[in-house]
Amino acid sequence: MKTVLKWNPYLDCELSAQEGWLEELSREGLSVRCRFGPLALCDRGEPRPGRRFRIEPARTWASASDPPARALTDLYQEAGWTYLRRLPNELGELFYTDDPEAPEPYTDPETKALALEGLRRHFWGSLWKNLVLNLLSGLYLFVLFPKLSSGVSASLSAPLLCFYLASLALELLLDVAEWRGMRRTCRRLEEGETAPLPPARRLGLLKGAVTLAGLLFLILTLALIIAVLPLLILEVPL
């Protein structure tokens, strides 16, 4: 089976955009096998131009191996939707239908808004995890900076610190944008507005910039470690 690598330009909180992206892939005969951040590994199969997807963010499981709640799958099945699988990183459950006349599982927008609670919890958990990782990375850089400010590594240490600060600023901007997107989605649903908002392309560009900055930061870090390792070895007393 042929595999294809695809870029997902949308934020996780943009449920309607994620669903539309999956439908676009389905029209091309692609189905997502797994995700690595914004990159998705897809299998190529038979095109399904009429397939629709719905993401259910409500968390109904205690561990990743648990099946979805029976009440949830029954709700979707009664409306003509079929359970497909759990989304990567436990972002929710994925349902689909090939019936163009199948109604929406939720008729009450407020109920749908409550279902976003799981997505909010995932966002805050991911935010704290990223914050801890960034603080550890910053501590590593600033503690070792005196050792890295001379010799062969001097040309690498300053760019690395600049890229670290730039990537941190971009990631904070992305977190703020995703938080605002979730608040806007929940507020519209609670007010009874069910029509999806068009995805903001600039947020896709911001997501790409964060990914690129993180990749450059990783490359520079590896280059710096390779450059400074001989110096650290020479300083170790025999």
Image: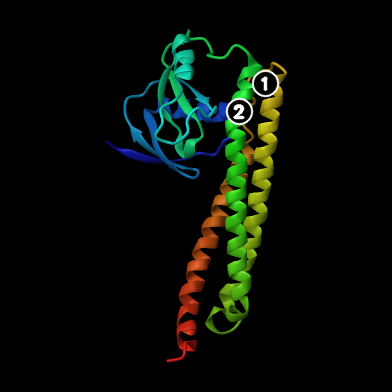
Q: Is residue 230 left or right of residue 29?
A: right
Q: Quadrant of the N terminus?
A: top left
Could one spot residue 194 in this view of the protein? no
Disc on res. 163: none
Element assignment for label 1? helix
For disc 2, the neighbor class at 10 Å (few under 14, some 14 to 19, many from 20) is many
Toward the front, the furthest residue is: 62
For disc 1, the neighbor class at 10 Å (few under 14, some 14 to 19, many from 20) is some
Q: Residue at x 54, y 13 (%)?
A: 104
x%, y% of residue 142?
63, 71
Q: Residue at x 47, y 27 (%)?
A: 93
Evaluate if marks 1 and 2 touch, with contact meaning CB atoms under 8 Å apart: yes
Q: Give residue 74's quadrant in the image.
A: top left
Q: Callout 1, which amino acid?
A: Leu
Give the residue pinned by disc 1: 189
Give the residue pinned by disc 2: 116
Q: Quadrant of the C terminus?
A: bottom left
Q: Give residue 83's quadrant in the image.
A: top left
